[in-house]
Amino acid sequence: MRRLSLLLPLLLTFSLTCLAQDGVANKVDEYIRAEMLAQQIPGVSLAVIKNGEIVLARGYGMANVEHQAPVKPETIFQSGSMGKQFTATAVMMLVEEGKLSLEDKITKFFPDAPETWRNITVRHLLTHTSGMTDYPRDFDLRRDYTEDELYQRIKPIPLAFQPGEKWSYSNLAYVMLGVLIHKVSGKFYGDFLQERVFQPLGMTTARVISEADIVPNRAAGYRLANGQLKNQNWVSPSLNTTADGALYLTVYDMAKWDAALYTEKLLKRSSLEEMWTPVKLNDGKTHPYGFGWALGSVGGHRMIEHGGAWQGFKAHISRYPDDKLTVVVFANQARANPAKLAHRVAGLFNPELMPGPPK
């Protein structure tokens, strides 16, 4: 009898916690479904991770509209520029091994690079401060390129500014980081990630995109044209393998990734903190971006996040490290706003993280 009286408060606390979580989960369901309708999103995959453990993982809507296949937590999405954090991690692994330095000029690895690149460092590429641009308008996304052909195509593109002078998002800088990883490690960046990140963490469905391979639970990507849902635009196979963002991921993969970021399984704590430090420009000012991560805060709580957009897919991860809370959202519609979903869901789990009204 005494043992039962001791257990009753614990059972009551557990029951109340479960009820509270169910209440929040219901609010999340209601919010996500309303936003999917408003934003015309066919499918969404969502995970909420607390202390490195999944507390909510759900799929909503359709992974494939033509086949009426529903989204599940196991559904595989293209993740776009969310992949930059993995590219940056691979670079930092090589830095820790002494195979390159953040202050190395990239002409050390590309001796035939144009003269305008002579002051670009590895750090500049990681932080979008190299002066390199995004893909130019005349870049043929339907042509296959080897790594060397990509390099030769990027070489003549003029820099937009001197290295370190400004911050400007550059996919081409991360394409170059993928080529650099291959040069330094001797391995294609996708193979490097598979061996050094995905397999050790048990990210069993994480991989470089391949539309040729049979990939179970793969979602289809969509876009809107005059308000009508259409299939994604096609790009060449080789441009689905570049290091600026060409990965298949699930929310389960991202939960394992998130848990690892609280440890030193992949990188030293000092390396991770460097990745999450705002970049300093030549004039001493800083910009809220690190190495493959955007930096910010909400309600005084630190926020480390990144989005992705590619081929009819959108993705977002928002990490609140001081709260040990992370929200991951994948969507299969090119105009979706997964950041809005992630921020709002975080606020439902912790009201202090609720974003303010849009400006």
Image: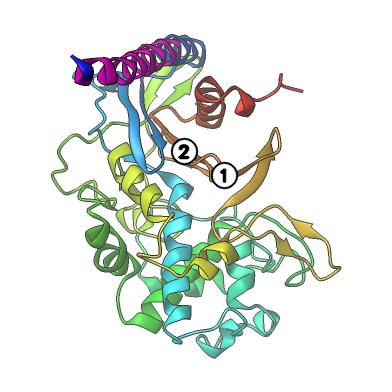
State the SS at label 2.
strand
Judging depth in this view, the residue of 161 and 45 nearest the camera is 45
**Which mark, by number, is residue 322?**
1
Say if 216 sits above or below 106 in the image: above
Q: Which residue appears at 54% of the width and 39% of the height? A: 323
- Quarter-of-image position of residue 298: top right
Q: Amino acid at mark 2?
A: Thr
**Which mark, by number, is residue 326?**
2
User: Which quadrant of the figure contains the C terminus?
Assistant: top right
Image x and y of residue 331, in percent = 40, 29
User: Which quadrant of the figure contains the N terminus?
Assistant: top left
Mark 2 Cα-neighbour bin, 10 Å: few <14, some 14–19, many ≥20: many
Q: Is 4 in the magenta? A: yes
For this view, does 212 lie left or right of residue 335? left
Q: Which residues are magenta?
A: 3-27
From the image, state whether disc 1 or disc 2 is nearer to you. 1
